[in-house]
Image: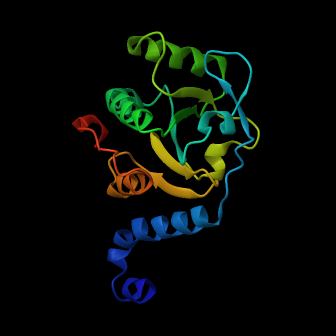
């Protein structure tokens, strides 16, 4: 139908692009299974941590892909804190993966997290240089949230203000309540 609609009105082609991109992303995510034995370095240094240790016996894990050089990521920190607090309270761990794997990005991330206190919410990790998880999950913008079941199945890939994320989360645990988010993340 899209091909026919595009053929009849090429100027409307750009209206179909987001739908096609979402369809392709959903198809790719449905075919993926995440290996929880994958390890990542903590932002603050130390031994690599396996995703299996973070998820533990939980039914799912929420990954946030983040960059210290994104104004949107910085502006969304209060919303991220509210989301992480709600999910942690309901036994859904949250891990943030920093996309850039460099000393500068790590130092900038640590500096941005200082206002959140000694122990920022969630687990903060650096994505791998070789075979990054962000590439496998087709992360093209930040911040992006990916909800993964304990079996490694991708339940959601998108933004925190999406209804689908919150529907997936309440499907896992009905007592999860969507926190009030500021307009910065929307």
- Residue 141 can be seen in this image: no
Which residue is pictured at 42% across the width and 68% down the height?
17
* Nearer to us in this view, 40 or 22: 40
* Image spot of residue 75 (x, y percent): 33, 28
Which residue is pictured at 64% across the width and 66% down the height?
31
* Image spot of residue 88 (x, y percent): 44, 33
* Nearer to us in this view, 46 or 170: 170
**Quadrant of the image containing the C terminus:** top left
Say which quarter of the image contains residue 9: bottom left
* Nearer to us in this view, 68 or 168: 168
Q: Give the vertical position of 149 relative to 184 (above or below).
A: below
Say which quarter of the image contains residue 98: top right
Q: Give the vertical position of 45 relative to 164 (above or below).
A: above
Which residue is pictured at 51% across the width and 57% down the height?
155
Please state if 179 lies on the left or on the right of 29 as rendered.
left
* Image spot of residue 21 (x, y percent): 48, 65
Which residue is pictured at 60% across the width and 41% down the height?
57
Please state if 114 lies on the left or on the right of 182 as rendered.
right
Q: How is the image coloured?
A: rainbow
| Numbered circles on residues, count | 0
- Residue 106 can be seen in this image: yes
* Nearer to us in this view, 110 or 88: 88
Q: Give the vertical position of 121 relative to 39 (above or below).
A: above
**Quadrant of the image containing the N terminus:** bottom left
* Image spot of residue 153 (x, y percent): 60, 58
Say which quarter of the image contains residue 125: top right
């Amino acid at each position: 139908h899209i091909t026919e609609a595009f053929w009849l009105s090429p100027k409307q082609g750009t209206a179909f692009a987001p739908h096609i991109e979402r369809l392709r992303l959903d198809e790719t995510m449905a075919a993926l299974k995440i290996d929880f034995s994958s390890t990542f370095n903590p932002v603050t240094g130390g031994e690599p941590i396996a995703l299996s240790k973070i998820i533990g016996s939980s039914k799912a894990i929420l990954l946030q892909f983040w960059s210290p050089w994104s104004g949107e990521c910085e502006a969304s920190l209060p919303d991220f804190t509210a989301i992480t607090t709600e999910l942690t309270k309901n036994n859904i761990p949250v891990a943030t993966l920093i996309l850039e794997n460099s000393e500068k990005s790590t130092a900038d991330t640590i500096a941005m997290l200082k206002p959140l206190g000694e122990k920022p919410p969630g687990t903060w990790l650096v994505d791998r240089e070789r075979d990054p998880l962000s590439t496998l999950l087709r992360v093209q913008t930040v911040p992006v949230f990916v909800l993964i079941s304990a079996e490694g199945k991708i339940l959601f890939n998108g933004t925190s203000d999406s209804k689908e994320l919150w529907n997936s989360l309440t499907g896992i645990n009905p007592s999860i309540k969507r926190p009030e988010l500021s307009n910065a993340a929307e």
